[in-house]
Each structure stands twice: as C-alpha cells, then as structure tokens.
Image: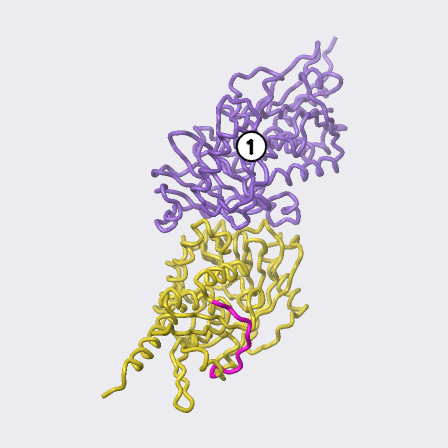
Amino acid sequence: MRVAVIGAGVIGLSSALCIHEQFHGLAPSLEVELYADRFTPHTTSDGAAGLWQPYLSDLGNLQETLWNKETFDHLLGHLHSPAAQEMGLFLLSGYNLFTEPVPDPSWKNIVLGFRNLTPKELELFPGYSYGWFNTALMLEGRSYLPWLTNRLTQRGVKFFHKKVESFQEVGGDGVDVVINCTGMRSGELQPDPELQPGRGQVIKVLAPWVKHFIITHDMKSGIYKSPYVIPGSEFTVLGGIYQHGNWSEENSAQDHKTIWESCCRLLPALQKAKIVSEWSGLRPSRPQVRLERESVWHGNVQGEVIHNYGHGGFGITIHWGCAMAAARLFGSILQERRKVASSPQPRL
Amino acid sequence: MAALKVAVVGAGVIGLSTALCVMETCPSCSVTVLSDQFSPNTTSDVAAGMLIPHTYPGTPIHVQKQWFKETFTYLFAISNSAEASEAGIHLVSGWQVFKSTPKEELPFWSDVVLGFRPMSEAELQKFPQYRCGQAFTTLKCDCPPYLLWLEKRLKATGIQMYSRKVSDLWELHSEYDIVVNCTGIGARQLVGDKKLFPVRGQVLKVYAPWVKNFIRDGDGLTYIYPGIHRVTLGGTREKGSWSLSPDPGTTKDIFDRCCSLEPSLQEAQDIKVKVGLRPSRQCVRLQREVLSQGGVKLPVVHNYGHGAGGFSVHRGTAKEAAHLVGECIAALRGSSSGAKL
C-alpha cells in the first residue's frame, strides 16, 4: 500500500505522521512518500507565529471546534515530555482586546484559566474596553516542522522535492492513496473557488521583555485586521493584516507602516525593538476546512484522494485534529480494500 | 542659603531609588550617592526583582500594602511606556502553587497585582504534586537594567556617584549635612545593628527563552521567574549564613526542584550561579536618628532591612525616607533661623 502525501507544511507533515503511526504495523508494507516543492523554513506554516487560537466564532462548524480541542489536548499532553522544547511547544498567556463586549468564544473551556479582563488590566490598553485573559500554547513552526520531519525520516518516510502538477502524476504508478495537503495552491490540482488567499504580513522583532500575546480585534473589520503581538522563543511577531483575495507574497511598505504604527501604539516599548525580518504569506482561507475523500480515476484504475486543506489562519491550531480525521478516512479506505481482497470469488 | 548636601550611602535598589526620591522631594538639595558596590555587583543584581511582597512581622499590614501599592503603581506606569525595555520592567503572569492549603486564602496584596484568582482544576493538572494555587499577573524589575536606568535618571538630575567604602557614618559629617543609610546587609557592620541578619539566597540564572510564565511554590523555596534575557531559578533561604560562595550541591538541588515544576528546564543553557544575602529584619528600619559628637550633629535617615521584599516595596520606602529627609531639612533650617530667645 503506497501513500503519497502532497505538501510539507504543518498539515502535510502531521497527516503523514498520523497515518504512519497508526497503520504502519497494520497495513501490508505501508509505504508513505511525501512530495512538496517547498519545505521548512519556506512553507506558510513557517511564517505563522504559532499561537494556538481559533477564530472568535466557529460559524457553526462544531467539527472544527472539536478538531481544535483535540489539537490543544494532544499538545498539552506533550508539554511535559522531553521533546517539548525541541518541538517548539510551550505555554503562553495573554490578552484578547475588544472595543465592545463580545460573547465568549467556542474555545473558552479548551484553553486554561479563561477569564474577563479587570478594569485595571484594561488601563494597559487605552481604547479597548473589554477583553479576555487566558493561557494557551505556542507551537513554533520553525521548530515543529523540523521535528515532524525528523520523526517521519526515522520512520522511513521518503521525501521528494518536486512540484506535483496533478493527482494523476503521483496517483497511478502503484500509489493507492493521495493525501492532498497543498494548502493555498490546492486550486492548481483541482479548481476550488471557495479557496481564497487571506494575505498576511508580519514583522519579526527582538523584544524579549514581552511575555504575553496581545491580540486586538476590530469587530467591524474582521479577523487579523487589527494589531497583534505574539512573543516566540526568540523573536516577537507583530501583525495585523488580512487581505482577502490578494495573492501577493511580496512585503508591502504600506502594510509595514500599518503594522509598525499600530503595534507601537498598543505597546509603546516596541518602539525600541530591533526589526529582524519581514514576511508575507497567504492563509489558505475557505468557509470551512475541506477534509473528505474523493475517488479519482487514473486511466481505468480507481484511486483515492483524501483532501485536507483550507485551514485559513488556524492551521497550527487545528492540525492534529485534522490529521487524525485524515487518518480515520485512510483507515476506512484500508478496510474497504481488505474486504474486497478477502471477499469470496463469484461462483461460475 | 546654601544647598543642603545629602549623602546617600548604598547603590542597590534602595539607595538609588531613595536618592531619586530625595531629588524629587527636594530639588534644591545636592545629592551624592556613595557606595563600595554598584550594579552589577549589588545584592539587588542577584535578586529576580519580582513584585511579590514579603511580609514583615514587625510592620502593620496596611503600611506594607501602601508601600507595595505605591511601588506597583510607579512601575506599572513605566512598564506601559516607551522606556520599559531600557528600565527592565515588564509584566509577567504565572502561578503560585501550594502542596497544602495556605492559612491565608487571600494575601494582603491580592488586589494590587492584576487578575488575582484561584487556579482552575485544569491549570492545577500541570502541577500534580500541588493541591491548590493562585494565578495572577505582576511586574518584574530586571537587574542590572533597572539599576542602570535609575543611575541614568540620577545622573540626568546632576547627582554624582562615587565608589567609596564608608566605614563609619560619622566620617561624612564634615562633607554632608544629612546622610541616608541604604546599606542593606552592610548596615550590620556600619551601624552595628544586631537585629539585621543575612538570609542567604543562591539562584541560577539560565537561558530558557521559551519559559514565559512564572511558577512559585508557596513555600517560597522553589521558584521560576522569567526575566528579559534569563530565567531566575531559585532558591534557598539560609538564615544567618554569610557565605557568598556558590555551593555546587545547592545548585543541583535548585535545578532539580525547578525541573520537577517545569520539566522543559532540563534543556536550559548557560547556567550561571549567583549568591546574595537578603538584608533581613523584623521590620524595615525606616527612621531618623541624630548622631552627635562634641556638639556637632549629623542627621541620619535609615532605610535598610528590606530582606526578601526589597523590590516589592522599594519605591514606597524610598518616598517615606525622602519624607524623613524633608523633616531633617526642616529641623536644620528651623534651628539655623536664629537663636531661641
């Protein structure tokens, strides 16, 4: 049984790992191969700050809330393991700020110690009259992706640096299942008008005195269009850009100005922070995550594709729940194949 | 009338903050800081600088609370300004955990720090050996940055600072009109205060930048305090020990205790060991005294004995000391404005 995973961001690597961990002993000679044209540190996942936090509302997508919870609980379980630091995993507390009262989020009982901000805490953030405090997790892509890659390499998963142009290119030729984790560029393999870029830009600075994440929200503008500050283990990420439909991966001077000025207004001490780098990336946005099976024909051979893309700005937040769901879909494919293989031959 | 000359002896957090307060209260005074040690070699430089008060048995709680509140408010404003990083002041959140339920449900300072509340069951799961805890957000003063920032502010007001070992406060009587004694543990020898005793603290300062929250065992012996560049791991409270030499056995013990609270510390790098002697006393000695020899008087204001709580109350006690200096000035001016009839 050969499985080809396309995509080496957090979704591709974790899906490959989940499938291999669960089935390598069960499926006859399971071979997992991973194809991607970009590997860490050049994937979308590498640019993300790495904070576990879903959007404010799950828009009725209860399934996504469950996947988020599964991811948080899975990571929390790893917090005290010796691998945590290597994974880039650690606890981080911080603030979500609003200019008006808002309903509690779907994830209030998933994170630790969720509460409203006190009036004295709000004094820290002039212009904001309401907010939350909670402790969440950071999972830094620049550590987590290499860690996943190492786990996969140890398991004998083979990596191929190659831009895949079609499912047929990797399907057929003995590959039974393709896992499509191509994020933003899924549309190149199969058109999907629901998948649109949510362009973001971030400035990475040295500000080691910042020990909390601070995420502001402008309910009228929408998610990530308001300044945010997220301290990592080495650098602090400043952001606040979300441009729907913008495919540019070039840094914009105007966006730089917006981010810098709004973050310095939020945290005056940032004026003294040294800028280390700047990055733009495309969040693979979709009204909901596409996580489903599809049969694809290579000539007259039927192959299966498991789609796992469209995680917008919450890929890291939801990745493990989705990887487990993809593995379950893979499991059902395995089950079906076994039934077919072991079913009695028709009587003549 | 000539400007009064005030000498502040001691350049730790108490000496420097007191000198600054004296300048603020009495801008016409000429203030000089004298110390045998300056940052990074003061006791303050060893401390983590966390604003979590120590309780002084000999001081009324409302006074301690006032000192803490004043200090917290002062530092809160700096942490919120563009100067925060230079001053080394930053907010930090975390947990104080208890193996057995503490006597006091609410410490006196719980409404001064931010967001104080009991820990949830889910949070306590991270600390399986502990049965309850408190979560809150407080401030940390990193040293040397905070002391260097205070020195910079002092120099900007024209204050001079000299490296000098003062063996006897009286030796200053000819050069200065008022002396402020902020010598910390040095006061034991300098003024012979037998009520002052060292409580030795050994700490490790390690590189572990992924640690963003503080963790403190309610017994005060084990703590993890993330600073700007390094995390302070502690500690010990050895009453009566004067030894400033790091003890390797203690180092391992501190490291092990902190790793059991926060396992990821096993990956900590570049471990530096420091020792400081907390200048401990039943209560902070914050009082006036007049030394006199042969008809010559030297007013002294004492401000020492802050023990484990120096950072937590430094601004509050500095302001009170400056107020006492103000009283000394009034007394001097009163007595110099003509003989009594």
Magenta-highlighted residues? B160-170
Left or right of B314? Residue A252 is: right
Q: Which of the pair A139/A75 is nearer the observer?
A: A139
Which chain comes out purple in the rendered image?
A
Residue A313 vertical position relative to residue B198 in the rendered view, above or below = above
Amino acid type for the residue under numbered disc 1: Gly
Q: Which of the pair A197/A326 is nearer the observer?
A: A197
Is label 1 in a helix, a strand or a loop? helix
Residue B328 vertical position relative to residue A306 in the rendered view, above or below = below
Look at the image and tell me whether residue B116 can be seen.
no
The residue labelled by disc 1 is A315
Look at the image and tell me whether residue B327 can be seen.
yes
Colour seen for chain B? yellow
x and y percentages locating residue B305 in the rendered image: 47, 74
Picture residue at 59% right of the left edge, 37% below the top: A277
Q: Which of the pair A299/B327 is nearer the observer?
A: B327
x and y percentages locating residue A198 in the rendered image: 51, 26
Residue furthest out toward the front: B1
Picture residue at 57% right of the left edge, 15% below the top: A191
x and y percentages locating residue B172 in the rendered image: 47, 80
